[in-house]
Each structure stands twice: as C-alpha cells, then as structure tokens.
Amino acid sequence: MRVEFYVLSTATPADRQRAACQLALKAWRAGMPVFVRGADQAQCEELDELLWHFKNDSFVPHDLHQHNPQAPVVLGLDEPPATSQGLLINLNPALSPHLQQFSRVIEIVNQEPQLLALCRENFRLYRQKGYDPQRVEL
C-alpha cells in the first residue's frame, strides 16, 4: 500500500477540504474508487456540499456512505469501503481501521499546529505498521 502525506502551506481548514475534493476528482477520473474519511459527520456533510460546486466545469459522482456505499466517491467515517483496493483520503485525526482494504492512502496536512502534531504521530504509526509514508509538498 502506498501512503502519502500531502502537505499544504496554509493553516486554513477549507483549503484542506478543497484539496480532498481535487484529489477525489483526479482519482475518480483515473478510474479508482475513492473513500473520503471525515473527522465527523458534519465534515462529511460539508464535503458532500463542496463536491457539488468546488469546480464549476466538472461533476464528481459522490454520496454519503449511509446513502450509497457503492458511489464512485464515498464520504464516510469508520465504515468499511464497499470496494477494496481504492484510494482512502483520510481527513480523520486517527488511522482508518480498514487500511488493508485500500491500495493507496493520502493524509492531507495543513500548518495548523494541533493537526501537524497529529499527522506526525500518524506518520510514525504508519512506519510502525511497516509502511513507508512519503511526504508530498502542495
């Protein structure tokens, strides 16, 4: 499994959500199933709304897990993905309990101090689990 930490230069939560939408669009266009894991239900609902209008010239087929777990882009929390070997975009502060079901994981990091500390810990946890996480500057 490929694990990447995409690092944003800002501390704005909205930039983190916009990056998640852009990455979901790119992966979906490449034919990969996508599971965006939010920190809580409110964030999932914000992402659901953002995916409708973050890019005027394109549409990302998506739904909340409880409504359609088979959607090309699924927004959820700790539910197992309906399709394995896809992309997990993790916005949750903890690692997913279903890591083995994904072929790729992207953690999106911004410069907010508390989130940076959590992401550093996640980086260490991935290493402890035998993964080789990579850092990608955005």
Image: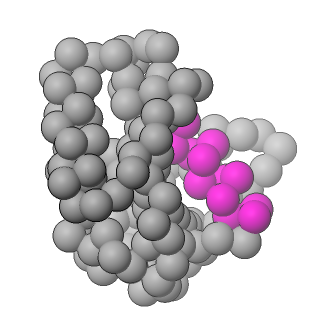
Which is more toward the observer, 15 or 114?
A: 114
Residue 93 within the segment the image draws in magenta? no
Residue 17 within the segment the image draws in magenta? yes
Q: Is residue 43 visible?
A: no
The residue shown at (27%, 41%) is 123
Tell how many labels: 0
User: From the image, which quarter does the N terminus lie in?
Assistant: bottom left
Answer with the quarter of the image where residue 117 lies: top left
Which is more toward the observer, 28 or 6?
A: 6
Answer with the quarter of the image where residue 121 lies: top left
Q: Position of residue 98 (x, y in %)?
A: 28, 74
Q: Is residue 5 above or below residue 105?
A: above
The residue shown at (76%, 62%) is 29
Q: Is residue 8 above or below residue 89?
A: above
Q: Position of residue 115 (x, y in %)?
A: 23, 27
Our reading of the magenta stretch's main secondary structure is: helix
Q: Is residue 64 visible?
A: yes
Left or right of 60 on screen, residue 115: left
The residue shown at (34%, 57%) is 131
Q: Position of residue 6 (x, y in %)?
A: 48, 35
Q: Which residues are magenta?
A: 16-30
